[in-house]
Each structure stands twice: as structure tokens, then as C-alpha cells.
Amino acid sequence: MTGGLRIAIDGPAAAGKSTIAKLVAKKLGYTYIDTGAMYRAITYKVLQNFIDPRNEEEIAKLVGNTVIELQPGGNAQKVLLDGIEVTEAIRSHEVTSQVSAIAALTSVRQLLMKKQQNLAADSSVVMDGRDIGTSVLPDAELKIFMTASVEERAQRRLLEEQLRGITNDYETLKREITERDKADSEREISPLKKAEDAIIIDTTGKTIEEVTDRIVEYAEKRLTK
Ligand code: DC
């Protein structure tokens, strides 16, 4: 640690993790690392190369030859895959529907986890994902487990997609979110799970500002301890 904290934010799909993690990072002057974007970038590459999502051997080879860069910028973090920007492309419906299967592969997790640990090695970070507090940064100084009712998560995702010009319906989104949570929670390695020492924040009915301020307060308390 270089005077700052490592903050791990985990939780189910569409609980508001990335929006809030980004704001917390900005307020504290920390680096934000979106680990979901890394799994999405690999999934995008698998699909682009027409590799069967169950073909672990081919996928492991592909991951070994992949460079993923997360570049800070404005409100959005830029994601570069082998030097090409894929920030928007990795949010497609196709990627979202396949990402849990790719994220369940041992070789993919091992490689990305190493990369995530390296990114957090010498800086103050806010990292969001599913297994940050349990596996990637088990010694993180502050761990948050962020939840929200599935109804609210589907509603938020619907609005988010509408803003991006994507047409979807509430019931489909609710079903997809539930399925992704189930797959992410039931996989064998580093499943979505609350770390024992994580603080639970239920964001249902809370504003982005409220949740951000609460996490920043926790961080400030940890820093003055
Ligand atoms: O946070 P997100 O929705 O962009 O994440 C996409 C998928 O990536 C999620 O369904 C599970 C996987 N993921 C993971 O397995 N471990 C992480 N640390 C982050 C994401």
C-alpha cells in the first residue's frame, strides 16, 4: 500500500457497482478498475474469432495472446482490446449473454486475476467485480458487497439501455439478470460471494450520491485509523 486503500466492490449484476465505484475513485483520486470489462473483452474476442465458448483450450490460448488496457477518461473508462477500442462493443447483448460461461473457465480466471492483482499492486484502487474481496484482493482494506432488489436492477438496466438506444423489455432483463447471477454464484471457482468481512450496502431506493458518500466515509474512516 502506498498510503491509500484498496477498495473491493462486489455484488450481483446491475447493482450499481461500476457507476458508484467510478465516483468513489474520482472523489478519492484513486484508480478505478472494472474487472467485468476484462471478462467482457475476452468474451468479445472469443465471439469475434468464432470460437466455441466451451472450447477451453482454444480460449486459454487466446487469452494468453491478448492485451487488455483500461484507460481512465471522463465519465467512461476506455477499454482497449489488442489496441482497438471496444468500450461500447463489450456491452452488447451477445457479449452479456455469453460472458458468464467464459468467466467460469479456470484458465480465463487465472490469467485475468493475475492481471488484476498486478494492476492493484502499487496503487490506491477501487476495483469492482464478483470475487474481488474473496479471491483477487482478499487483503483489501475496505470491502463492500453491493446489492439491490432484482426489480430495481432490471429497471435501472432498462433505463441505461434506453439511453444507449437499445430496445429491451423489463421482464426479459429481469430474467437475464437472474440467470447471470445464478451462473456467477454457482460456478466452481471464485463464485460471486460476499467476503466475510465485507460491508453490505443495499442500494434499493438509494441515490447514487448517497451510496457514493457512504463508501467514501467508510474509506476516510479506514484512512484515519
Ligand atoms: O460487471 P459486469 O456485468 O460487467 O460483469 C460481466 C460478467 O463478468 C459477470 O456476469 C461475471 C463476470 N465477472 C466475473 O466473473 N468476475 C469478476 N471479477 C467480474 C466479472
Image (cartoon, grey):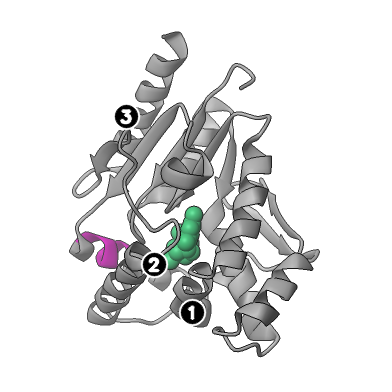
Mark 3, Cα crowd under 10 Å, few <14 / some 14-19 / many 20+, is: few
What residue did someone put label 1 on? 98
Is label 1 in a helix, a strand or a loop? helix
Q: Which residue reaches farthest top?
A: 225
Q: Is residue 149 above or below residue 164?
A: above
Residue 132 picture location, percent across and down? 47, 45
Which comes sooner in the sequence, label 1 or label 2?
1
Residue 153 is covered by the magenta coloring: yes
What residue did someone put label 2 on? 187
Residue 62's label in the rendered image is none
Asked whether residue 88 is in view, the answer is no
Quadrant in which the C terminus is drawn: top left
Q: Nearer the viewer, mark 1 or mark 2?
A: 2
Which comes sooner in the sequence, label 2 or label 3?
2
Which segment did they paint magenta? 152-156
Q: Residue at 64% of width from left, 19% of height from top? A: 2
Residue 195 placement, left or right of 139: left
Q: Residue at 79% of width from left, 68% of height from top? A: 65
Mark 1, Cα crowd under 10 Å, few <14 / some 14-19 / many 20+, is: some
Along the line of sight, which residue is nearer the eye, 119 or 56?
Answer: 56
Q: What kind of residue is marked 2?
A: Arg
Q: Are marks 1 and 2 in contact (CB under 8 Å)?
A: no
Residue 139 picture location, percent across and down? 48, 31
Q: Residue at 74% of width from left, 74% of height from top? A: 61
Instruction: Specify whether tag 2 is near ligand 1 (CB below 8 Å).
Output: yes
Asked whether residue 194 is in view, the answer is yes
Q: Are marks 2 and 3 in contact (CB under 8 Å)?
A: no
Residue 41 placement, left or right of 220: right
What residue did someone put label 3 on? 214
Residue 45 picture location, percent across and down? 67, 77
Q: CA distance from mark 1 to mark 2?
A: 14 Å
